[in-house]
Amino acid sequence: DIVLTQSPGTLSLSPGERATLSCRASQSVSSSYLAWYQHKPGQAPRLLIYGASSRATGIPDRFSGSGSGTDFTLTISRLEPEDFAVYYCQHYGSSPQTFGQGTKLEIK
Amino acid sequence: EVQLVQSGAEVKKPGESLKISCKGSGYSFTSYWIGWVRQMPGKGLEWMGIIYPGDSDTRYSPSFEGQVTISADKSISTAYLQWSSLKASDTAMYYCARLGAAAILPLNWFDPWGQGTLVTVSS
């Protein structure tokens, strides 16, 4: 199974700052089959990025994804108050399609 | 509009059986894989397994194989997650989610998601 390790576990930033979240895979993720989700308490997770770098429908362009192979990054260029949440990466190139353990983005 | 609507919260005792549901609408139910994701209290998301309603091809995470059963009834566009004997450790929020594109192979992200079903197992 591919293990995804996200870092940092918690990221404390202020609105307007730039956030950089990392997702590292234990083996290469084929064809960049990697997605990012945002999860807020009491809500269903929301797809942000698929294919490592393609934004999902309706996602603001301050969210961007990059990377390939074993190292992937989600960048939020300028944090808005509604961006503070937990973020998960997920690979979907083989079964089981595991999630990372999450990065909590909190207001500093 | 594509929607997944899950059944309501459940409170059960250890040893009881349970089947929760996820009804899809607004798309061709038989053409998209549907999966289940667990979130235990205070923990992260865990991929449990997926099913292709078109032919009932099912894939499980090794962590969940034998512990739960994933099924689908294409006549009513509904996927299910069931337990034969619940444990306290099954207490969690369970989400269903559709894979993002119609495909025979499950090489897709999850989008959209259902609203979640909270399962509480307590004596």
Image (cartoon, rainbow, N blue to C red):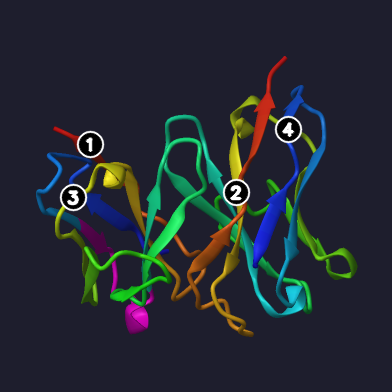
Q: Quadrant of the N terminus of chain A?
A: bottom left
Q: Which residue is mark 3?
A: A79
Q: Residues within 10 Å of mark 1 (few under 14, many from 20)?
A: some
Task: Identify the chain of the residue marked 3, using the numbered disc in the image.
Answer: A
Return the disc, 2 or 4, that comes first in the chain's sequence.
4
Estimate the spatial distance between the alpha carbons at disc 1 and disc 3, rounded to whole Å. 11 Å
Q: Does the residue at mark 3 contact the one at mark 2 (Cβ under 8 Å)?
A: no
**Is circle 3 on the same chain as circle 4?**
no
Kind of residue at disc 3: Leu
The residue to which callout 1 is attached is A106
Vertical arrangement, residue B64 with respect to residue B33, above or below? above
Per the model, the C-alpha gap separating discs 1 and 4 is 35 Å
Residue B97 at x, y percent in the picture: 59, 59
**Residue A93 location, quadrant:** bottom left
- For the residues labelled 3 and 4, say whether their Cβ atoms are less than 8 Å apart: no
Front position among marks 3 and 2: 3
Q: Given the current orientation, which residue lies at the most extreme left position?
A: A17
**Quadrant of residue B7 within the rendered picture:** top right
Q: Which residues are magenta?
A: A22-33
* Other residues around mark 4 within 10 Å, as few (<14) / some (14–19) / many (≥20): many
**Secondary structure under the numbered disc 3 in the rendered image:** loop
For label 4, the residue is B86
Q: Is residue B12 above or below residue B37?
A: above
Amino acid at dot 1: Glu
Residue A80 pos. (x, y %): 22, 48
Q: Which residue is mark 2?
A: B95
| Residue depth check, mark 1 versus mark 4: number of the one nearer the observer | 1
